[in-house]
C-alpha cells in the first residue's frame, strides 16, 4: 500500500516548510515477555501560529500461532490548530499487516482548552481489510468492513506538578461479529500485546495520573479494552518515567503488565528518546 509513503512525504514537506520553528523528534523500542518487538519514530513541528503538524511511524513483528511471523506497520499524520480556547485536530493513519489485517483510519477531534482544563470530543472512521488464512479446519476468508468510533478525552492540571487525564472510545462496526464463529481468527491473532487484534476493539478506556518529581515526570496508566471479535477483556497497567538527559533531550522508560483473556499475562518494557529543537 502506498499510503504510508504518502503520509511520510506530507510530514517531511511540512517540516521543510516550517523553516526554523520549534520541532520534536523521537525514537523508541518496545518488547514484551513473548519476544514481540516494535520500534517507533515520532516527529512534530510548528507549521504556523498555533498550528502543529505531527506524525509517527512504527514497525513490529510477532510470531503467530500458525507458525508465520506477522510484520506490522503503523503510519500516522495529524494537523492540530488551536483557535484559543477552541481547537481542532485532523488525522489520518494506516496500520496493520496487508497479508492479514490492516486499516486506513480518519479522525477528527474538537476540543476546548485553557490553562488547567482540556475536554475533547472525538470521531474516527476505520476502513478494514481482513484476511483469515486457511487452516486444516478452515478454508480461509477475506472481507472488508468499517467502523465508526465516538469518544471523549479529558485532561486536568490540579497543581503545577500534578495532573490527570482520561479517555474513552466506543466503536460501531458495519458487520456483526459472533464470538463462537471467530475462534479461528482470534487464535491466529491473539498471541501478544503487539498483536493486530489489540487494534480491533469494541471499546477502550484509560486513565493517567502524572506528577513532576524534580526535573522528571512520573506517570501511572491504567487502560482496558474489549475485543470486537470475541468480546474478551484486556487490562493493562504501566508506569512511565520521563527525565531530561540534557537541555534539549529527554528519555522515557516504561514498564507495564497486561492481564488478558486472550493472551494471558505479559510484561513489557519500552524506552524512548526525544530531542527538541528549532
Image (cartoon, rainbow, N blue to C red):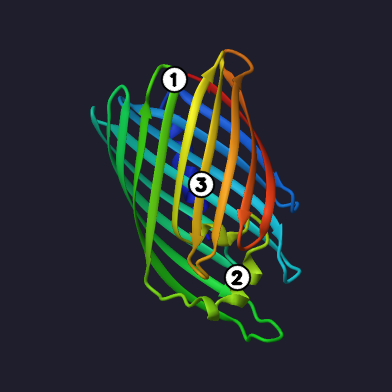
Dot 2: few (<14), some (14–19), or many (≥20) neighbours within 10 Å? some
Q: Which residue is mark 3?
A: 223
Q: CA distance from mark 3 to mark 1?
A: 38 Å
Q: Residue at x 50, y 44 (%)?
A: 8
**Nearer the N terminus, badge 3 or badge 2?**
2
Q: Which mark is residue 186?
A: 2
Q: Position of residue 129 (x, y in %)?
A: 49, 69
Front of the two marks 3 and 2: 3
In the image, taking residue 268 as reference, residue 106 lies left or right, namely left
Q: CA distance from mark 2 to mark 1?
A: 48 Å
**Residue 149 lies in quadrant:** bottom left
**Nearer the N terminus, badge 2 or badge 1?**
1
Q: Residue at x 61, y 41 (%)?
A: 40
Q: Residue at x 51, y 19 (%)?
A: 212
Q: Position of residue 238 (x, y in %)?
A: 59, 39
Q: Position of residue 196 (x, y in %)?
A: 58, 60
Q: CA distance from mark 3 to mark 2?
A: 21 Å
Q: Which sits in the foreground, 158 or 150?
A: 158
Whether 225 is drawn above or below 166: the answer is below
In the image, taking residue 56 as reference, residue 140 lies left or right, namely right
Front of the two marks 2 and 1: 2
Are dots 2 and 1 in contact, CB under 8 Å? no
**Residue 133 lies in quadrant:** bottom right
Q: Position of residue 195 (x, y in %)?
A: 62, 58
Q: Which residue is mark 1?
A: 20
In the image, taking residue 140 as reference, residue 35 lies left or right, namely right
Q: Which sits in the foreground, 37 or 50?
A: 37
Amino acid at each position: 500500500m502506498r499510503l504510508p509513503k504518502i503520509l511520510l512525504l506530507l510530514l517531511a514537506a511540512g517540516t521543510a516548510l516550517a523553516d526554523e520553528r520549534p520541532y520534536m523528534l523521537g525514537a523508541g523500542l518496545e518488547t514484551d515477555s513473548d519476544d514481540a518487538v516494535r520500534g517507533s519514530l515520532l516527529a512534530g513541528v510548528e507549521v504556523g501560529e498555533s498550528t502543529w503538524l505531527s506524525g509517527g511511524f512504527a514497525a513490529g513483528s510477532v510470531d503467530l500461532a500458525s507458525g508465520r511471523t506477522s510484520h506490522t506497520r503503523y503510519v500516522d499524520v495529524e494537523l492540530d490548530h488551536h483557535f484559543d480556547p477552541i481547537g481542532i485536530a485532523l488525522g489520518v493513519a494506516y496500520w496493520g499487516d496487508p497479508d492479514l489485517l490492516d486499516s486506513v483510519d480518519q479522525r477528527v477531534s474538537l476540543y476546548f482548552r485553557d490553562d488547567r482544563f482540556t475536554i475533547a470530543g472525538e470521531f474516527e472512521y476505520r476502513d478494514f481489510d481482513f484476511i483469515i488464512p486457511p487452516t486444516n479446519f478452515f478454508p480461509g476468508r477475506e472481507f472488508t468492513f468499517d467502523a465508526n468510533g465516538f469518544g471523549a478525552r479529558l485532561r486536568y492540571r490540579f497543581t503545577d506538578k500534578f495532573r490527570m487525564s482520561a479517555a474513552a472510545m466506543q466503536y460501531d462496526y458495519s458487520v456483526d461479529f459472533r464470538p463462537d464463529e471467530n475462534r479461528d481468527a482470534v487464535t491466529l491473532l491473539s498471541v501478544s500485546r503487539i498483536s493486530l487484534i489489540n487494534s480491533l476493539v469494541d471499546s477502550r478506556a484509560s486513565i493517567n495520573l502524572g506528577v513532576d518529581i524534580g526535573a522528571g515526570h512520573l506517570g501511572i496508566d491504567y487502560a482496558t479494552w474489549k475485543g470486537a471479535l470475541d468480546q474478551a477483556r484486556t487490562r493493562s497497567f504501566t508506569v512511565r518515567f520521563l527525565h531530561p538527559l540534557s537541555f534539549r533531550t529527554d528519555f522515557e522508560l516504561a514498564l507495564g503488565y497486561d492481564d488478558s483473556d486472550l493472551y494471558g499475562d505479559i510484561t513489557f518494557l519500552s524506552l524512548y528518546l526525544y530531542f527538541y529543537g528549532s
